[in-house]
Amino acid sequence: MNNLKEIYVAKKDKNIVMAKIDTLCRKYHNRIGVNDEQRKALFRSYCHDTIEVFEECFETTMLGMKRYINKVEDFRKRDNINLEAASLIILNMLMDLKGVVIEMIPIKDLPSCKKLTELSHEDAVSKAKDLVKNDIVKAGISTLLLGLKICDVVTIYDVRRYYQNCLEELQNEIQIKANQISPIEQFLFDKFKAELGYCHLAMFKTGIGAAKELNDLVEIAKKDIERYEQKQLVNCDNIVVKS
């Protein structure tokens, strides 16, 4: 799996994004100017096209992409720079991002315990024993995002831990940006909180966990879910996330 820790959001289908990255890399592969002036012009064009791909394909208000854009923009503006070394850094950025995109999952396909909350108590208890086997969450996505092996049993706790980690990372990124939260970050914040809410309601329904803790969380869960469902203004089908 890719080692980049920030949350990345693509605005286009992952195959389109990967194709654009590949096209960009091919465009500048082995292109060398005949003199310093041409080499500098070619490098600035490379920086310009890279930023253009970033802005076209990704949500650039997210911390990870802001850092990437700032780095390339800094390269583009500098006169005294090792062009070969800077070009290699940009190429590595693109390869890292391609690795991120490969692991991206559409928002609508992220694991969720919502289905459990809609079942009867008996069915919820039965299906909660293995969320993949009982078609509550998708097998391939679960092993990728939840850090589990194909043979592992997926439980409510696994989904809950995933969203706790997502929420913690998102809060950390927003804090680093001096608490400047963008619309997509607000959407993700509400999404992660709502999914945690579904986990807590599912735990309450199935009798998993400490009763006192769950009683305290149920009302919070209902409010978080209501807030998310009332404010869904983002076209989820076109968003893919890697966290």
Image (spheres, rainbow, N blue to C red):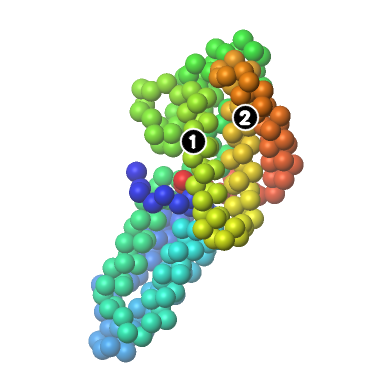
Is 199 placed above or below 90 here? above
**Residue 162 circle label:** 1
For marks 1 and 2, give the CA distance: 13 Å
Report if the CB atoms under discs 1 and 2 are less than 8 Å apart.
no
Is 100 placed above or below 138 here? below
Residue, disc 2: 198
Q: Quadrant of residue 226?
A: top right
At horizontal 48% and vertical 50% (from top left) the residue drawn is 7
Is 102 placed above or below 39 here? above
Amino acid type at image mark 2: Tyr
Amino acid type at image mark 1: Tyr
In terms of secondary structure, where does tag 1 sit? Answer: helix
**Residue 148 circle label:** none
Q: Quadrant of residue 140?
A: top left
Which quadrant: the N terminus? top left
At horizontal 62% and vertical 23% (from top left) the residue drawn is 214
Q: Nearer the viewer, residue 30 or 160?
A: 160
Kindly give the residue lying farthest to the top in the view shown.
Answer: 122
